[in-house]
């Protein structure tokens, strides 16, 4: 039975508030808590559920990142993935190159589905899945909040600005997850121990024949403009009067 | 000179206001000459609307039965072949543009700048990262064509009064277009209220509302104010309202004149969606709620007594 490939990015935990370095050259991430990108955790949960329903074989998790990315992949194995692939890269790649790496992995694994998060919460790019689908020449269904497999097709409900859209895509396909697709399971301690025995392959980026290119050069990182703290009013009446004075209500 | 191609967002009849905001962004690119492309089964109506936008020089109609619904896999190859000779290809950072534009960029083997919030030069842009906690200035290097999505809350809509030429572009034959994707259904909550993304006033509710029924008290407040309705993720997850009401990092990024947050704590992911609101009002029973850090007017108290009172006063 065909596998599912899940792309997992290591990011600063969503509860941590990051700061810009004083010289504006980057974001200070040293020593911060790192986690699986929340959308990718949802992607993994969905893959596990599909496997548990008997609709897929293995669940393979893959990541591109520094050696420490091992931690997030081990966590993914503890959640229930069957094996992990780490493409080691000390520098962070742009989405187009990430997508090129995943095309290689998709060609190797020949999965039924590639599941990704809709966006990584560090760079907020929201690009990789769509780029992978284009380069792999397969259908895409982005921002999924419901996913059903029927034979050689997937029926996907997508969260779009107008509401919900349902599309049918031929498999294999690329699907990116939205927050309401599912609620990821908690990892139990014994699973973390057991996960240490699961297959874990590491490659160097260069062995995949991809030489990344920097096309978007970061020039400057800055904190956003802060809003001025306003005033506290005591009563609804005071509020309405203040808004009237500003011409915001009639 | 920069030749900028903007991909129009529309529903077959009406041009989405997000497109007029892309035009304003494009206009800030030095020496921009702007073309808007309308992909549709029948593009005439929408093309005429696009042609009236100020700063637009040319409108291209790309008509094809396969273009009736905007499917990324179908549109992207057509856009990629149209894009040759353009220095920039822009779309709105709405679910339409977010789905489509990276697929175009990959076909062009180029980079995409997501969520452009400011233009510094033809190749230099500012964009929010880390849920808006950081603003990054990026320089696109070695890109024959730069693909970008435009953070619509950062730009005013281009005005009307233009008179661009409208041309039909020769379409790709339907059989050449990627199959493998089919639209099954589109269900939007149709309302008579103003559209959340473009409304001048928005009333938004959070988890504190407690139920879909309770949420209805905000409907009447919104009606009194002529406001659109919004919600936090917690309220949507709990099923009080549909997903298209969600405001924030993973919902809609909005910039109304007045935003009233009721029973919303002010998580960073929510705040990132309302940063550009002119005036923020917060009603929350917890004086320490982070929403008060950004509110222009804060009122501490129980929403279940305050909201009816407000409604009476308005
Ligand atoms: C990757 C990611 C993306 C996310 N994207 C979004 C997003 O796009 N939009 C979004 O909103 N969230 C988003 N979130 C979730 C976000 O972190 C918060 O969990 C969410 O915004 C909380 O919603 P809330 O303020 O309604 O609920 P809570 O945080 O539970 O706040 C409820 C508030 O109501 C107040 N309250 C309770 N009872 C009353 C009463 N009777 N009267 C007055 N006040 C009362 C409480 O004091 C509290 O401040 C995201 C999270 C993640 C991890
Ligand atoms: N370096 C990476 N390693 C693994 N997966 C990634 C990486 N970068 C992006 N992804 C995947 O692509 C999704 C979208 O990321 P982005 O396009 O960067 O917002 C993420 O949610 C991940 O599933």
Image (spheres, rainbow, N blue to C red):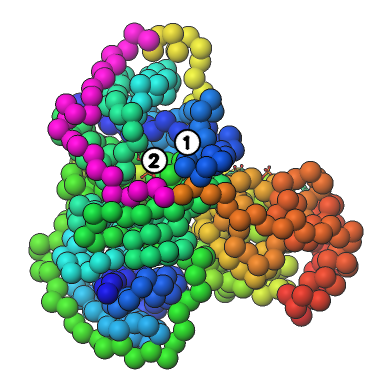
Q: Quadrant of the N terminus of chain A?
A: top left
The image shows residue B248, relative to residue B96, as above or below, that is: above
Mark 2, residues whose alpha carbon is within 10 Å: few (<14), some, or many (≥20)? many
| Residue A69 point in image, percent of width and height | 38, 24
* Magenta stretch holds residue B295: no
**Dot 2: what SS?**
strand
User: On the same chain: label 1 and label 2?
Assistant: yes
Q: Quadrant of the C terminus of chain A?
A: bottom right
Question: Ligand 2 closer than 8 Å to the CB at disc 2?
Answer: yes
Q: Residue at x 44, y 53 (%)?
A: B137
Q: Image quarter for residue B43?
A: bottom left
Verify CB contact (< 8 Å) between mark 1 and mark 2: yes
Residue placed under numbered mark 1 in the picture: A38
| Residue B19 point in image, percent of width and height | 40, 73
Q: Image quarter for residue B41?
A: bottom left
The image shows residue B94, relative to residue A87, as above or below, that is: below
Name the chain letter of the residue that bears numbered label 2.
A
The residue range painted magenta reads A196-219
Task: Pick whichever of labels 1 and 2 is earlier in the sequence.
Answer: 1
| Quarter of image, ligand 1 | top right
Q: Residue at x 42, y 91 (%)?
A: B161
Mark 1, residues whose alpha carbon is within 10 Å: few (<14), some, or many (≥20)? many
Name the chain letter of the residue that bears numbered label 1.
A
Is residue B233 visible from the viewing direction of this image? no
Q: Return the mark for residue A117.
A: 2
**Dot 1: what SS?**
helix
| Residue B98 point in image, percent of width and height | 37, 56
For the residue pair A18 and A69, the one nearer the viewer reads as: A18
Q: Residue at x 32, y 75 (%)?
A: B32
Question: Ligand 1 closer than 8 Å to the CB at disc 1?
Answer: yes
């Amino acid at each position: 039975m065909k596998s599912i490939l899940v792309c997992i990015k290591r990011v600063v935990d969503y509860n941590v508030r990051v700061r810009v370095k004083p010289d504006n050259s980057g974001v200070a991430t040293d020593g911060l808590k790192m986690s699986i990108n929340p959308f990718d955790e949802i992607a993994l949960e969905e893959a596990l559920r599909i496997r548990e329903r008997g609709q897929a074989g293995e669940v393979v998790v893959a990541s591109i990142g520094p050696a420490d990315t091992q931690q997030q992949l081990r966590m993914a194995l503890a959640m229930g993935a069957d094996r992990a692939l780490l493409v080691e890269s000390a520098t962070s790649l742009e989405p187009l190159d990430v997508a090129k790496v995943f095309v290689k992995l998709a060609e190797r694994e020949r999965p039924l589905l590639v599941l990704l998060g809709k966006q990584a919460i560090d760079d907020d790019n929201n690009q990789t899945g769509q780029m992978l689908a284009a380069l792999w020449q397969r259908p895409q269904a982005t921002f999924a909040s419901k996913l059903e497999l029927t034979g050689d097709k997937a029926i996907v409900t997508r969260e779009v600005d107008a509401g919900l859209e349902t599309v049918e895509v031929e498999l294999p396909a690329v699907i990116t997850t939205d927050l309401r697709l599912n609620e990821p399971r908690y990892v139990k301690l014994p699973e973390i121990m057991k996960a240490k025995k699961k297959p874990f392959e590491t490659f160097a980026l260069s062995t995949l024949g991809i030489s990344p290119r920097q096309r978007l050069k970061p020039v400057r990182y800055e904190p956003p403009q802060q809003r001025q703290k306003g005033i506290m009013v005591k009563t609804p009446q005071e509020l309405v009067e203040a808004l009237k004075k500003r011409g915001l209500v009639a | 000179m920069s030749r900028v191609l903007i991909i129009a967002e529309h529903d077959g009849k009406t041009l989405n206001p997000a497109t007029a905001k892309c035009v304003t962004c494009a206009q800030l690119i030095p020496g921009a000459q702007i073309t808007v492309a309308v992909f549709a089964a029948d593009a005439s109506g929408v093309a005429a609307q696009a042609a009236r936008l100020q700063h637009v020089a040319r409108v291209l109609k790309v008509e094809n039965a396969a273009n009736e619904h905007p499917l990324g896999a179908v549109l992207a190859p057509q856009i990629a072949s149209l894009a040759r000779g353009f220095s920039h290809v822009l779309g709105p950072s709405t679910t339409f543009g977010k789905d489509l534009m990276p697929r175009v960029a990959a076909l062009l083997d180029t980079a995409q700048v997501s969520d452009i919030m400011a233009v510094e030069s033809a190749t230099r842009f500012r964009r929010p990262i880390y849920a808006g906690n950081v603003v990054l200035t990026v320089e696109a290097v070695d890109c024959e064509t730069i693909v970008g999505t435009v953070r619509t809350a950062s730009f005013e809509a281009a005005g009307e009064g233009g008179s661009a030429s409208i041309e039909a572009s020769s379409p790709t034959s339907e059989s050449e277009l990627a199959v493998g994707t089919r639209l099954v259904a589109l269900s939007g909550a149709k309302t008579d209220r103003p559209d959340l993304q473009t409304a001048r006033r928005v009333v938004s509710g959070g988890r504190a509302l407690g139920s879909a029924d309770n949420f209805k008290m905000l409907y009447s407040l919104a009606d009194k104010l002529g406001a659109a309705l919004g919600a936090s993720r917690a309220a949507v997850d709990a099923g009080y309202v549909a997903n298209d009401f969600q405001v924030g990092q993973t919902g809609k990024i909005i910039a109304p004149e007045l935003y009233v947050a009721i029973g919303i704590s002010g998580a960073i992911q929510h705040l990132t969606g309302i940063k550009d609101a002119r005036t923020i009002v917060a009603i929350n029973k917890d004086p320490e709620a982070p929403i008060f850090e950004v509110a222009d007017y804060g009122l501490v108290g129980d929403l279940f007594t305050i909201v009816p009172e407000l409604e009476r006063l308005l």
